[in-house]
Image: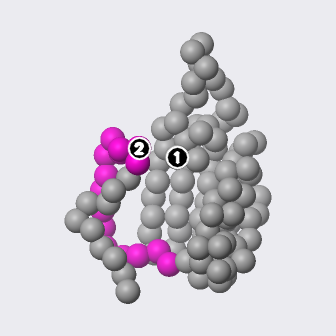
C-alpha cells in the first residue's frame, strides 16, 4: 500500500518543493553512501533508523554509488553565533535518493 499526500509534510519547512510521479522503494539490496568528512556519521545514523524500521540490513559505504546518497559539499563550519548552515537539497526519483548539503547539520535535517 502506497500512501500519497497532496503536499508532503516536511520539517523543517522547505523553501521550494516540486513533485512528480513515481516512487522510490527501499529493498533488502538498498545501499546508503556518503561523501564528505562528517557525512559518514549521518549515513550511519540514517542506517540505524532505517534498519529496524524495514528489517533490511542496509549497507553504508563511502562514495557516490549508493541508492541513497548523502553528499556533504564542504567541511563543517560554524558562524560567530555558533550555528552552521543547515540548508539542504533533496531529490528523489525511482532509482536514487540524493541529499546534498554544505554541512552535516544540513544532511541530518
Q: Position of residue 12 (x, y in %)?
A: 41, 44
The span shown in magenta is: 11-25
Q: Residue furthest bottom?
A: 1
Give the quadrant of residue 45.
bottom right
Q: Are marks 1 and 2 in contact (CB under 8 Å)?
A: yes
Q: Is residue 26 above or below residue 73?
A: below
Horizontal side of 67 relative to 18 (left or right) equals right
- Residue that carries the numbered disc 1 in the rendered image: 109
Report the front residue among 46 and 60: 46
Horizontal side of 4 relative to 80 (left or right) equals left
| SS state under label 2 | loop
Give the quadrant of residue 83.
top right
- Residue drawn at x 22%, y 65% is 6
Name the magenta segment's main secondary structure.
loop
- Taking the magenta stretch, the answer to whether it contains residue 6 is no
Q: Residues within 10 Å of mark 1 (few under 14, many from 20)?
A: few
- Residue drawn at x 65%, y 73% is 52
The reply to whether residue 35 is in sight is no
Horizontal side of 43 relative to 93 (left or right) equals right
Quadrant (top left, top right, bottom left, bottom right) of the N terminus: bottom left
Q: Is residue 71 above or below residue 104?
A: below
- Residue drawn at x 33%, y 56% is 9
Report the front residue among 31 and 13: 13
Q: Is residue 63 above or below residue 25?
A: above
- Residue that carries the numbered disc 2 in the rendered image: 12
The reply to whether residue 53 is in sight is yes
Q: Position of residue 54 (x, y in %)?
A: 59, 78
Q: Which mark is residue 39?
A: none
Which is more N-terminal, label 2 or label 1? Answer: 2
Amino acid at each position: 500500500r502506497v500512501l500519497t499526500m497532496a503536499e508532503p509534510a516536511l520539517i523543517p519547512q522547505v523553501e521550494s518543493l516540486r513533485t512528480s510521479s513515481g516512487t522510490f522503494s527501499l529493498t533488502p539490496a538498498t545501499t546508503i553512501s556518503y561523501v564528505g568528512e562528517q557525512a559518514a556519521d549521518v549515513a550511519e545514523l540514517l542506517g540505524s533508523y532505517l534498519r529496524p524500521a524495514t528489517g533490511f540490513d542496509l549497507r553504508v559505504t563511502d562514495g557516490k554509488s549508493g541508492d541513497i546518497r548523502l553528499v556533504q559539499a564542504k567541511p563543517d563550519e560554524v558562524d560567530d553565533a555558533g550555528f552552521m548552515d543547515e540548508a539542504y537539497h533533496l531529490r528523489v526519483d525511482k532509482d536514487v535518493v540524493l541529499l546534498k548539503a554544505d554541512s552535516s547539520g544540513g544532511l541530518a535535517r
